Image: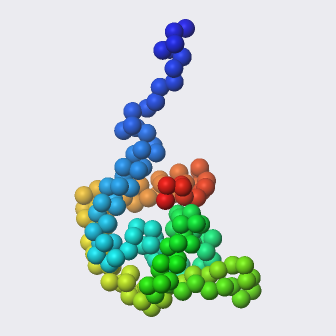
Amino acid sequence: MSEDADRQTFSPTRKSLPIMLLRAREAVMFRIRPMLRQIGVTEQQWRVLRVLEESGELDVSTLAERAAILGPSLTRILKTLREVGYIDVRRDRDDRRRSLASLTPAGATLIASAADDSAAVFAAIHAEFGTERTQALLRELDALTEVLGESGPDTAD
């Protein structure tokens, strides 16, 4: 057998799942970043705020998992969000080793201030891509995550 025949070939990058997921993420985030700049938060800070807004008070480990952020990065993000008054972090009364994070009224106000812009961004995405296709994509991504298992965020975060 020739050396070329033994060589493993890669799928074209347009058919590479990791690359296409990153491209899709960037296409969506391109639409969201102006809103985030306007309210003065980073993508990672926004994820933390949104998870807390949706879930209420959470222990930091659960927050890291749901926001897809590594622990060391989350520690830095929580410090910043606490300093600007968008979140509170306190020790769990029952387990002093655990920290709990929650949204403050200022954090809730910040999220509310972005609601119309966020709705407009996603309305445009739904109009261009289709609501049914968007919902189907979300279901498929959820199923993929379920099958492959959630192993947490990459270190690139």
Q: Is 90 situated left or right of 23 in this image?
A: right
Q: Is 15 situated left or right of 95 in this image?
A: left
Query: Residue at 59% of width from left, 50% of height from top?
Result: 147
Pick the residue in front: 68 or 85.
85
Q: How is the image coloured?
A: rainbow
Q: Position of residue 70 (x, y in %)?
A: 56, 63
Looking at the image, the residue that sits furthest to the bottom is 105
Pick the residue in front: 19 or 115.
19
Residue 28, visible in the rendered structure: yes
Q: Position of residue 26 (x, y in %)?
A: 35, 55
Q: Is 150 situated left or right of 139 in this image?
A: right
Query: Residue at 36% of width from left, 52% of height from top?
Result: 24
Query: Residue at 58% of width from left, 58% of height from top?
Result: 152
* Quadrant in the picture for the N terminus: top right
Vertical placement of residue 96 versus 137, above or below: below
Total labels drawn: 0
Vertical placement of residue 142 versus 18, above or below: below
Residue 143, visible in the rendered structure: no
Q: Position of residue 96 (x, y in %)?
A: 73, 83
Looking at the image, the residue that sits furthest to the top is 1
Q: Position of residue 137 (x, y in %)?
A: 41, 55
Query: Residue at 63% of width from left, 77% of height from top?
Result: 59
